[in-house]
Image: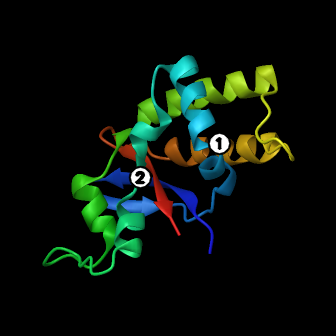
Amino acid sequence: MSTVLWANLLIDGEVSSDESDKAALHRHADKLDGIFQRAAGVSLLSFCDSTDLEYNLGDDEELPEGMTSTNQVMALSGKWIAATEAVRAITAALAEIEARKIRFGLLRNDHDAVVAELKESLAYAGSTQAPDARFNFSIVM
């Protein structure tokens, strides 16, 4: 089982996910964090949420009373960024990655996978017109 990122939106207290595995984004998250900070002034890791991972790896981690999913926990206490800010940050990072043809990986170059996953995430983050929409990446197994 591999660890990946999923793109999520929080609208009116409800989490929706694209449920699309973004393995390259997870694999290169630290490098991408630096690119996001340089290009957009925002840390990618500041909106990567580990709620789902923590509950799945926890030995006896039970959901709080009245909650039936980790999405509900993440909605209340997860790491989020305004969806409009996510669109701006992803767009800026993507522009730098494409313009500089940044390499991801030593033995193989995941550049194309990173670009494709960022474009998919950008489309998802920009898919809502809700003014208070929030966006994050959740770390899932």
| In this picture, residue 55 sits left or right of residue 42 | left
Whether residue 57 is visible, yes or no, is yes
Residue marked by disc 2: 9
Residue at 62% x, 68% y is 2
Which residue, as the protein is rendered here, is positioned at the far left? Answer: 65
* Quarter assignment of residue 61: bottom left
| In this picture, residue 51 sits left or right of residue 26 | left
Upstream in sequence: badge 1 or badge 2: 2
Q: Position of residue 20 (x, y in %)?
A: 61, 62
Spatial CA span between label 1 and label 2: 15 Å
Q: Quadrant of the N terminus?
A: bottom right
Nearest-to-viewer mark from 1 and 2: 1
| In this picture, residue 68 sits left or right of residue 55 | left
Q: Residues within 10 Å of mark 1 (few under 14, many from 20)?
A: many
What kind of residue is marked 2? Answer: Leu
Residue marked by disc 1: 118
What kind of residue is marked 1? Answer: Leu
Q: Position of residue 39 (x, y in %)?
A: 58, 19
Residue at 14% x, 78% y is 66
Residue at 34% x, 71% y is 55
The one nearer the camera, 119 or 12, is: 119
* Quarter assignment of residue 73: bottom left
Q: Which mark is residue 69?
A: none
